[in-house]
Amino acid sequence: MIQLGSTINPELQHVVSSLTAHLENTPFPGFIECVPAFASITVYYNPMAVIKSRISSGYRESPYKIVHSYITNIIQDNGSAEKFTRRKVDIPVVYGGEYGPDLEFVSSHHSLSVQEVVKIHSSSDYLVYMIGFAPGFPYLGGMSNKIAAPRKSSPRLRIPAGSVGIAGQQTGVYPISTPGGWQIIGRTPLPLFNPANSSPSYLQAGDIVTFTPINEKEFQEFKEERH
């Protein structure tokens, strides 16, 4: 695990994403994958493959020391900064009703109208800090405190895939149907996780996400076009 800091902010996230991109674009022998988080990266590698790559040169260090030295040199050289460009992704969302059963709770919690909550939520650019909790679930930063809301006291046993939720000062999207305790304010017809794809998660750490309000008819039309 590479610990790059102890705070949550866009600048540190850019460092995490830059180093992640560098490792994925120029993998060392034995590299399997790396998983970025808020302030760290976990690197998975095959130790036997690492050793085999160094046998001919008579290198006798442990696989961990070899990988540690490789990654330390990358960080010290600061050669990964220019290798990462943020991708912008727009996500259509139908807010309220059966698609967002907790929208009215969020509005009453802040003495705002439903329309005001939708406007605030859909007017920000959100940074994907990490993917976690469930396959493809994005933890998004950048939501206004004006619509922050507590988690539900009793989690739902099933939240439909595509549900957009709020928990504390974070917002996120449930890519698959799963239990959860976030306040659900809407739903997107955009599929965010497909295990058959080479990159199963539609969103990746470092992406910039915007939400665009749509109506129920547009929601259904979008889903029909995808089938």
Image: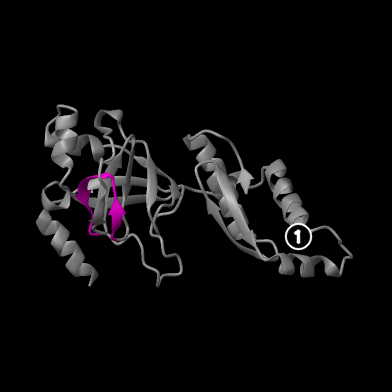
Q: Is residue 89 left or right of residue 189?
A: right
Residue at 28% from the left image edge and 39% from the top image edge: 151
Helix, strand or loop at mark 1: helix
**In the figure, residue 122 lies in which quadrant?**
top left
Instruction: Give how far across and how far down residue 190 sits, in percent.
Output: 27, 59
- Residue 117's place in the image compared with 226, above or below, is above
- Is the C terminus in the top left, top right, bottom left or bottom right quadrant? bottom left
Can residue 40 be found in the magenta stretch? Answer: no
Q: What span is in magenta?
A: 177-189
Residue 199 as seen in the image, left or right of residue 22: left
Q: Looking at the magenta stretch, what is its main secondary structure? A: strand
Q: Amino acid at mark 1?
A: Pro
Image position of 9 (left or right of 196) = right
Membership of 178 in magenta stretch: yes
Residue to which mark 1 is pinned: 63
Residue 18 in the figure: left or right of residue 144:
right
Image coords of residue 206 (percent x, y): 46, 47
